[in-house]
Amino acid sequence: MTQRDDPGKPQARASLGVLRKLTEQAANRGPRLAQLEFESLLREIEAGGWQQLVLAFDRPNVGKGALLTPPPILAASPVLQVPLGRIAWVPQPEHLPVVAIDVPALPAGDLTAQLLLLLSEHHRKPFMRLVFLSETTAPLALLGRYGFAVICRGDTPAIDIAQAEAARLKLSELRRLSDAAVLWRA
Amino acid sequence: MTEVRLHPLLCGDPFDPVMQLLAEDLAALGTPPEINVDPDPTRHDRILHCDQASFLAGLFVSPLDQIPVTVVLRRPGPMIGDDGWASGIGVIGRMVERLGRRAIQPTTLTPEAAAAVARAGCPTAVPLALAADAGTDVASDRRLWAEFDTDNGTILTSRGLMQADAQNWAQLRRRLRFKTDSCPQNDIWDLLTRCNSGAPAMQLPTTFGAAEGPTYVAVVTNGVGLGHLTRLLAIADALRAQAKARVVFWCFSQGAGILVGAGYEVVQRMTAQHLDCDYDDWIDWEEAAFSAFLAKCRPAAVLYDSSGVDRFVTAALRRPSNGSTALVLVRRAMWQSHRDPAYLDAAQHTVLVAEPGDLSAAADRGPTVTASPRLAGFARFARTAPVVLRPDGGSLPRAAARRALGVSPFQRRVCLVSLGGEAFGRDATLARDISASASKAGIELIWARSPLARSAADLGIDRALLRHLFPLGRYLMAFDGVITACGYNSFHEAMQTLLPVLLAPTANERLDDQVARASHAKSEGWAMMLDPGRPEDRAGLLDHFMGKVRAGQQVLRPATAMEGAAEMAQLILEETFRGKA
């Protein structure tokens, strides 16, 4: 051990002090940033219009667009991390289980209300990392902006997607957005 | 009762050129192989080992009495070392002698290899007969001549140099004819000779899947705005119009809903950045998923719009199952001058680098103008007219556009403000200054909110004046002036009008050189510019601009036809699709 590493020496004690202070600052900054992000999300939802993108396409001879899903991959590499979302903070998010949330196609008001309920709870007391399995692309941009994982599944049943993504994202279960009922467990 | 269709099983190193060639030959015969899975007599009618090492290793998992086995006996080269080559051949020769050719069919890539193998102790090996042996029509062979440098592992063509593993060899066989005079008679010589003889595979595909025309997979990267998405959408529309093509989007942009709304099939994906996960791990998963998807829909080409090409794409295209798929790079110019020219080397992975033209090209000081790629491969390079998304049915007439936007018919002057994906994050004071200046001049503002932008709630913009629209081009006739970001699409869309335009470029490191583009437009008299480096000039410029809008001024601009998307589609079809035979 060099003099610089020895915590008994004054120089090393000073370095440790700086490190401790920086760690404390980071720990304080995390919850504060999450609070600001949550407030921004609330303002965005309250302002309305987050789902109201008007697409000026007029293509009578073209079929309806569709969301496809690629063939399932059973194993390719180590499991990928899933983000906690920027509206929440815990010291070690990687220790939280990863839970898929089935988001069906809903009228705008219902979707807003149900997402708001879940996201408020997630902000207040995060106990899982979320992967939204959405039937439509409606919530993709909003949830993506706040750092959530979203898979737009189209007509493919949420359970099929949860099973297909279980190895990649280490999903532990699938729950319904409206009442949190468990639809599938790994 | 469902008929179970048997397929061959192909075994070996997936990045071995011979495996890539054989996989495509088998697919061309209508029997696409399964690759390196466990042998199963209920699924596989034969096993084809691409080299003797794979065959010998396979003896432990596949008893020879269940499924007939073909083994390609290779001469010394990258796959098989000189040491013990002859004794290995001798062992296999004795096995064939004992078990008979019904159980083991020894084969080689060329007659010359068959003779060498016979001398080494396996006299029954014959040159492999697959689809590629139908003979070459020399008169129609338009492939480029190429030289393989065995010392450096590179290939030199008249268009440029490339690494030998930059592309799937099934693509190389289609497009290159190799000189073999100076190559020693070994496995590389056999490989090059076999490539030279492959007639069916050198032709471009005629039909794909169930669609009437060819299939393409367009990869939309995750940009700051919607530039990549919009450009690829314009090209996809043109491919549909010209060849009834099926275009499927592999989309990392959070604007994926736009593509679904435009009537396309979309696979929405998350980047490593979205997941905040390890990039190399993400690449492995993405490559596996992308490769499986390509194998399922067998597109004529992957269309990729960016400066470079992500590794998951090039790796997936080198998989044996994807040899029939080429790569086309749509590469906008106007890079920032300090950008690394090494990105240009992505050309070696492609068959076509298509550059959408830029009205401000004269001001381009980026590497696409100042540098040459070290590895250009055999890619064709072409520059088209600017690529702009055409609104369906054209732009709405003024009254209809105003009605659609909910603008009062009594409002005399209206100005559009469209600041792009990072609109309200980059400079909160800009929005306030624009509002103040417009208010002084009695001009109503309509704010276009990008589908990717955060809410403008903090900026004091009246919600009633916000519009969430795509594409904006449909409504441009409603306005008397435009204030816009200076990304490729916004700029060229605005330059099509006769309206006064005020450009608000950003100096974001991730973006193109917007300041150069806007400065050129200003110097040509096409537009005014808010210089991000001179905020002190802003108020005066805004007042001057609003004066022009209030006066209803018109601005003459070059009458360039923005038909780049149609030109791109034509180029892509020429390089990747032969049309119906």
Image (spheres, grey):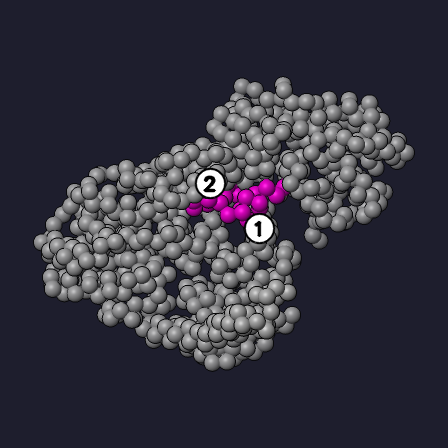
Q: Which residue is mark 1?
A: B287
Residue A16 % position (x, y): 53, 72
Lateral position of residue B36 relative to residue B140, left or right: right
Residue B515 % position (x, y): 28, 48
Marks 1/2: CA–CA distance: 23 Å
Q: Amino acid at mark 2?
A: Ala
Question: Which region is colored magenta?
Answer: B299-320
Q: Nearer the viewer, mark 1 or mark 2?
A: 2
- Seen at 88% across and 32% down, the residue is B94
- Seen at 64% across and 65% down, the residue is A1
Residue positioned most to the left: B551
Q: Amino acid at mark 1?
A: Glu
Asked if A127 appears above or below B112 in the picture, the reply is: below
Q: Is residue B408 visible?
A: no
Q: Which residue is mark 2?
A: B342
- Disc nearer the start of the sequence (1/2): 1
Residue B529 % position (x, y): 21, 50
The quarter of the displayed image where residue A93 is located:
bottom right
Lateral position of residue A141 relative to residue B83, left or right: left
